[in-house]
Every structure is written in structure tokens, then in C-alpha cells.
Image: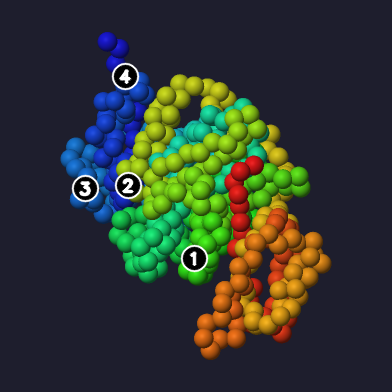
């Protein structure tokens, strides 16, 4: 029997994902080695803290992660430290030392990926980041390889497990926002700074990576339109239900005539669509390709071993590709850099979608006509209206509308005009509606 080629791994960071990766690699070593055709071994762990879930006996441990990046025995540095400062330095140091890198760090790739890939290209090393998007779902491999034949028209998905966990707990169990967030933190789903989850920043990190893979554009995190679930009002969740929709926090990237839409926000989707059924920490991404049509990918978007599943798959890929000439490897972002397109990411004003509007209107004749006329002057057509009965002692009533597709700039201008009407009290709340059917 020929001996397997040794591939030595150094894991940096032994938190939720680091611990999961250590345990999956150790537990499934035999089958991982059979699949990769290599003898993959963890030779060093860099972490300031131990993880009680991991048996580190026989493995070198250091509290200095840069020692791992410099260790001549390490072939692949697995960066599971998180954040964008030390992790960035670590990854650049590992690359400089000729190590391949596997990372689960979406913030790092979204913000510094272009630079990291350039450095890796110069050193002919691989950088793999499957775990950066949607935890255990192999969506990066899918876009980069499985759907390689397709012109991607759009993709849309639930790509933050914590946000979906909180929304589901609030909607289905009537739980309080803060309690649900605490639970997501305790389960290891939330980011070190959970405002990243709540404000949609984590989803934006992931979406920018998906948009780049889908459309062959450079990573442009600063151009993503981002709204979180923090300001979502439960009355809108209830009205959406009445209209046949559920509200999910989606990342959406779409190629349109003038450019690419890349946006993250709470979205009304038809209650009978598959994505509307995705609850808790689960993620789901729909991808529409011109050849394959609509596809959907579903799985756990966060958590120790689901995320480790993706990290270890990358380690296997790196081990398999070690003997492959650099130019024959799959490009980091699916397209060769020289082929990147300069298609612009559109500002939110130029995005076209349907809308849900809610306002408080005086309960008197003619108000609806005034609102409808402002909308129609801007070419916005109203598809459905609900007006609630006034509650005792109140002279304003909630007025809820669904519009057809409109340009966001036009919709916002109409909303500002509606807010100026004497009969309207306060702001016009607007949420975007997607049918995910074309
Ligand atoms: N905080 C992230 C989430 C972890 O909740 O989806 C996985 O990226």
C-alpha cells in the first residue's frame, strides 16, 4: 500500500467553530483521509483558551497564533479567530510564509478578500472560505463549480441564522426580541458583536461574497444596501400574514439591465414560498440560473459542527489540489480576476421592487383618494389595501398597501409627499416585497 501524503493543519482559534472543526477532523479522520487521499493531521492549535469540548492530547498548543503561521511543519493554516484586524494580519503572514489558508471569516473576505486573493495568487497558495457563507450549506462550491454553466439571474436567501432564529421566536412563540437574542448567543449562533447579526452587517458580508461569485464582480462591501431586523415592528409581521406573506430577513443579489442590485433587508415573501418555511437557525438560498432554472439550498447556517462541516470540506479540497498546478485550480471567486466585470452595484434608489406601506390616516372621506393620487402621479400602482377599523377614542386608522414594482427613488419621493398630507400622522413605513418566482 502506498503511504498517503501528509497534510499538516494548524488551527488558529478554538472557539465555537474552531472546537467543532477540531472535533470533526479528529472524529472522522479515517473517512476524511480516504476521501482526500491524504493523511490530514492537526499538528498545532493556536488559542489563548482551551475548549472543554476538545481533547487536545498529542497536539501542540500555543497561545500565539502567529507561531502557527510561521511553523515550518504546518501546510494549511485554518483561521477561526474572527474579526478583521488580527485575523487579517494572520492570514497575510500565513500566505507570506507559503501556507494555504482556510477561513470561516466572512467579514475578512468581504472587506479584504481582493487584497488577500492577490497576495495568495502571488505566492501560488490557496485560500478557501466555504464556511464564510451560510454555515454548512456548500453554496460557494455550488456557485463556483456546480452552477458554472449558468448565467446567474438572481439569488436570494436567509443567510443569517441568528436573525432568522430571533424572527421565528418572536413570530411563532411571541418571544421578546432580547430573550431570543440571548438564546441565540448562548447557542453559539451570534457573532462576537451581535449587532452584526441584528443590523444585517453579517448578512451583508455574506451577500457581497455571493454576488461576486455569481456575477464576476470584485468584492465591494461598501456598496451593499443594509437594513437589519432591529426596527421591525411586530404589527407589520401580523399585517403581512393577513396579506398572505411572511417577513424574512433576506440577502438579495440580482443582475438587471443597468447593473447589479446587492441588498439586505427584511422582506415580505409569499407565505407559500419554500423560503417562507425556513425557520430558526436554518439558512436557505435560492439561485436562479438561466440554464438550470430556480434552485434552492437549505441547511444549518451557524453552529459549531455545521460550520465545521464546511471548514473541513475546504481542508479536503486543499489537500486534493496540492498537486494541481496553480493555474489549474478553481479561481477564488469563480472567475479569473482578469475577467471581472465592471458592472456597477446600483444605489438603492435605482432598485426596483414591490412595496408594503403602512401609515396612520385620519378616518375621513377622501384620504385614500389623496394617497392613491400621489402614488399614481409617480406611476406607482396600488395592488391591495387594508384599512383597519378605528379603535375607540382614536381618530387615526392603520392603512396598509401593497404596490406593484416601482423604482425605490420614486417610491420614497411619493412616501414623503404622503407624509405631508394633513390626514396622515407620522412616517410612512415601507418594506420591500419579493415574489421569488421569476
Ligand atoms: N452569526 C452568524 C449567523 C454565524 O447567525 O448566521 C454564521 O455565519
The alpha-carbon separation of the residues under discs 2 and 3 comes to 11 Å
Closer to us: 13 or 61? 13
**Which label sits in the foreground, 1 or 4?**
1
- Determine which residue is flagged by label 4: 4
How crowded pointer 2 is (Cα within 10 Å; few <14, some 14-19, many 20+) is rated as many
In the rendered structure, which disc, 1 or 4, sits on the residue that comes first in sequence? 4
In the rendered structure, which disc, 3 or 4, sits on the residue that comes first in sequence? 4
Report the residue at 38% width, 53% height from top. 280
In the rendered structure, which disc, 2 or 4, sits on the residue that comes first in sequence? 4
The secondary structure type at the circle numbered 2 is helix
The alpha-carbon separation of the residues under discs 1 and 4 comes to 59 Å
Report the residue at 72% width, 45% height from top. 256
- Determine which residue is flagged by label 3: 53
**Which label sits in the foreground, 2 or 4?**
2
The alpha-carbon separation of the residues under discs 1 and 3 comes to 42 Å
In the rendered structure, which disc, 1 or 3, sits on the residue that comes first in sequence? 3
**Which label sits in the foreground, 2 or 3?**
2
- Determine which residue is flagged by label 1: 238
In the rendered structure, which disc, 2 or 3, sits on the residue that comes first in sequence? 3
Q: In the picture, which quadrant includes the N terminus?
A: top left
The alpha-carbon separation of the residues under discs 3 and 4 comes to 29 Å
The secondary structure type at the circle numbered 1 is helix
The alpha-carbon separation of the residues under discs 2 and 1 comes to 33 Å
- Per the rendering, the mark at residue 304 is 2
Instruction: Give the percent coordinates (x, y) of residue 83.
Output: 44, 55
Most extreme residue toward the top is: 1
Instruction: Give the percent coordinates (x, y) of residue 409.
Output: 74, 63
Instruction: Give the percent coordinates (x, y) of residue 423.
Output: 69, 83
Q: Give the total number of marks visible in the rendering.
A: 4
Q: Is residue 171 visible?
A: yes
Closer to us: 268 or 64? 268
Amino acid at each position: 500500500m502506498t503511504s498517503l501524503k501528509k497534510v499538516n493543519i494548524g488551527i488558529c482559534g478554538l472557539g465555537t467553530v474552531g472546537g467543532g472543526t477540531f472535533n470533526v477532523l479528529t472524529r472522522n479522520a479515517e473517512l476524511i483521509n480516504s476521501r482526500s487521499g491524504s493523511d490530514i493531521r492537526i499538528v498545532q492549535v493556536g488559542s489563548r483558551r482551551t475548549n472543554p469540548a476538545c481533547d487536545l492530547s498529542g497536539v501542540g498548543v500555543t497561545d500565539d497564533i502567529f507561531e502557527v503561521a510561521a511553523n515550518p511543519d504546518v501546510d494549511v493554516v485554518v483561521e477561526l479567530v474572527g474579526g478583521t484586524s488580527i485575523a487579517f494580519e494572520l492570514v497575510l503572514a500565513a500566505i507570506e510564509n507559503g501556507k494555504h489558508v482556510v477561513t470561516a471569516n466572512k467579514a475578512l473576505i468581504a472587506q479584504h478578500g481582493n487584497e488577500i486573493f492577490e497576495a495568495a495568487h502571488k505566492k501560488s497558495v490557496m485560500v478557501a472560505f466555504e464556511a464564510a457563507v451560510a454555515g454548512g450549506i456548500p453554496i460557494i462550491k455550488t456557485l463556483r463549480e456546480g452552477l458554472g454553466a449558468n448565467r446567474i439571474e438572481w439569488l436570494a436567501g436567509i443567510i443569517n441564522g441568528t436573525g432568522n432564529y430571533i424572527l421565528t421566536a418572536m413570530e411563532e412563540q411571541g418571544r421578546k426580541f432580547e430573550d431570543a437574542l440571548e438564546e441565540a448567543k448562548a447557542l453559539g449562533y451570534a457573532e462576537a458583536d451581535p449587532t452584526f447579526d441584528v443590523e444585517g452587517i453579517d448578512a451583508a458580508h455574506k451577500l457581497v461574497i455571493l454576488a461576486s461569485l455569481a456575477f464576476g464582480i470584485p468584492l465591494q462591501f461598501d456598496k451593499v444596501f443594509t437594513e437589519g431586523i432591529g426596527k421591525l415592528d411586530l404589527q407589520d409581521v401580523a399585517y403581512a400574514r393577513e396579506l398572505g406573506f411572511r417577513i424574512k430577513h433576506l440577502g438579495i443579489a440580482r443582475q438587471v439591465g443597468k447593473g447589479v442590485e446587492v441588498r439586505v433587508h427584511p422582506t415580505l415573501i409569499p407565505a407559500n414560498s419554500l423560503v417562507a418555511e425556513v425557520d430558526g437557525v436554518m439558512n436557505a438560498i435560492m439561485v436562479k440560473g438561466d440554464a438550470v432554472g430556480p434552485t434552492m439550498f437549505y441547511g444549518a447556517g451557524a453552529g459549531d459542527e455545521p460550520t465545521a462541516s464546511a471548514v473541513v470540506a475546504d481542508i479536503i479540497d486543499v489537500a486534493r489540489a496540492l498537486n494541481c498546478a496553480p493555474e489549474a485550480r478553481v479561481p477564488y471567486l469563480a472567475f479569473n480576476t482578469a475577467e471581472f466585470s465592471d458592472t456597477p452595484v446600483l444605489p438603492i434608489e435605482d432598485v426596483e421592487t414591490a412595496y408594503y406601506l403602512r401609515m396612520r390616516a385620519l378616518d375621513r372621506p377622501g384620504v385614500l383618494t389623496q394617497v392613491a393620487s400621489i402614488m399614481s402621479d409617480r406611476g406607482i400602482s396600488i395592488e391591495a389595501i387594508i384599512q383597519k377599523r378605528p379603535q375607540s377614542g382614536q381618530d387615526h386608522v392603520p392603512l396598509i398597501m401593497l404596490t406593484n414594482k416601482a423604482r425605490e427613488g420614486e417610491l420614497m419621493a411619493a412616501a414623503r409627499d404622503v407624509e405631508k398630507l394633513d390626514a396622515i400622522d407620522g412616517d410612512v413605513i415601507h418594506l420591500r416585497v419579493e415574489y421569488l418566482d421569476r
